[in-house]
Image: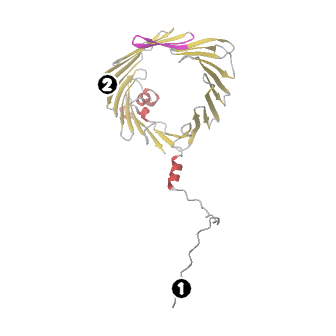
Amino acid sequence: MAESPPPPPSLPPNPNHMVPPIPQTDAPPSPASSISLLSKRPKLRVTSEFDSETSLFFHKVSCKLLDSFAKLKLSFQNNNKGEPSQPQFAFTSKLLSIHYDLEEQNALVKTSFDLGPKFHFKASHDVKAQQGEVAMVADLGDPGYALEISSPVPAVGVPRATLKFPLGEVSLGEKEEEEVKRTLSVSGIVKSQLTHGIFTAQFSDEDLKLRYRYKDEAVSFIPSISLPSNALSFAFKRHFTPSNKLSYWYNFDSNNWSTVYKHTYGKDLKFKAGYDSDASLGWASLWHKYGDGTTFTFAIGFEVTEPLHVCDRSICAKEEMVGNEASTAKTTPMKLKIQFMLQVPRDDIRNSALMFRVKKRWDI
């Protein structure tokens, strides 16, 4: 059988020949793009706190928007039945802030912005009270010098003028002594370096308070006097070592005094003890910080002369200042704060009361 001839060679493609375009379909989003969208979601910060004394839960939810240009915050509390109350909403930014109380149906609006290189305008308004204040601040050229003119809204009397300078400020305005009588009011504060300390004079009309603060590496001494009442007091602080400090305060007018001793063990353990004669309360507290950011505080208060509710007076204020938990609360994720407070009555130790607070924060 004869073999068939080979096929003819194919012709080169015609450059003028139009090839129909291939239809394109949208490609499904890649996992990387989905992750990118999620990473741009504003981060939420949720904080919950429980107080055994009031049996209330306090909650806050906040997030930053537009690369931290603005911040939204919602806060409310729950009672032991889970019923929400006192909800409040806040929007804050550099130019505008709005605080809205849902139960009161009232808003407090504040704004602040620059008008050119030397003028700054700020205003506040209480919607429900229909009251507010407007102010204009002018830069006087030299660093630290400024003049502020402010007036309430609706306007009552002449505006108030405040001259600010590096050593303090002086204000001139009006005050109401009676319903129809208004008099001139002068107030201000002046600071000056004096020897090894800072001298401060704060005055308002006929009242004058003089204060001097001397401080070196080991000792701080702060006497103050108010005129014309001649009320004299002084505070004294002594650093025995970098980890031991004693503070003392005395008021000559009321004979009230208080003292606090503080000892630190490194950066993660701090002990405080003190006594407050006005509250007739001795107290001690221990603060410890764990590696994951959790802080634990235990405080005990001893009533010396009469029954006293610990959390209404000095013990809660004192133990809140233990350590540096406030300075790390904004930077440590998954923050947990535990506080115990033990109240020991003077006459009946069996009626001691243990109160506690637990605060937890989540960064989502």
Question: In this picture, is 209 found above or below 331?
Answer: above
Rendered residue at 63%/31% (across/down):
109
Q: Position of residue 112 (x, y in %)?
A: 61, 28
> To which residue does mark 2 refer?
242
Q: Position of residue 192 (x, y in %)?
A: 47, 12
Question: In this picture, is 2 found above or below 138?
Answer: below
- Residue 239 in view here: yes
| Front-most of residues 7 and 231 | 7
- Residue 251 in view here: no
Q: Position of residue 263 (x, y in %)?
A: 32, 27
Residue span colored magenta: 188-205
Query: How many numbered marks does the figure carry?
Result: 2
Marks 1, 2: nearer the viewer: 1
Rendered residue at 54%/37% (across/down):
68
In which image quadrant can residue 269 be found? Answer: top left
The colouring scheme, among rainbow, by chain, secondary structure or one colour, is secondary structure
- Dot 2 surroundings within 10 Å: few (below 14), some, or many (20 or more)? few
Tag 1: residue type? Ser
Question: In this picture, is 75 found above or below 134?
Answer: below
Rendered residue at 36%/36% (across/down):
289
| Front-most of residues 350 and 14 | 14
199 in magenta? yes
Callout 1: SS: loop
Q: Position of residue 284 (x, y in %)?
A: 36, 29
Tag 2: residue type? Pro
**Residue 4, which numbered label?**
1
Callout 2: SS: loop
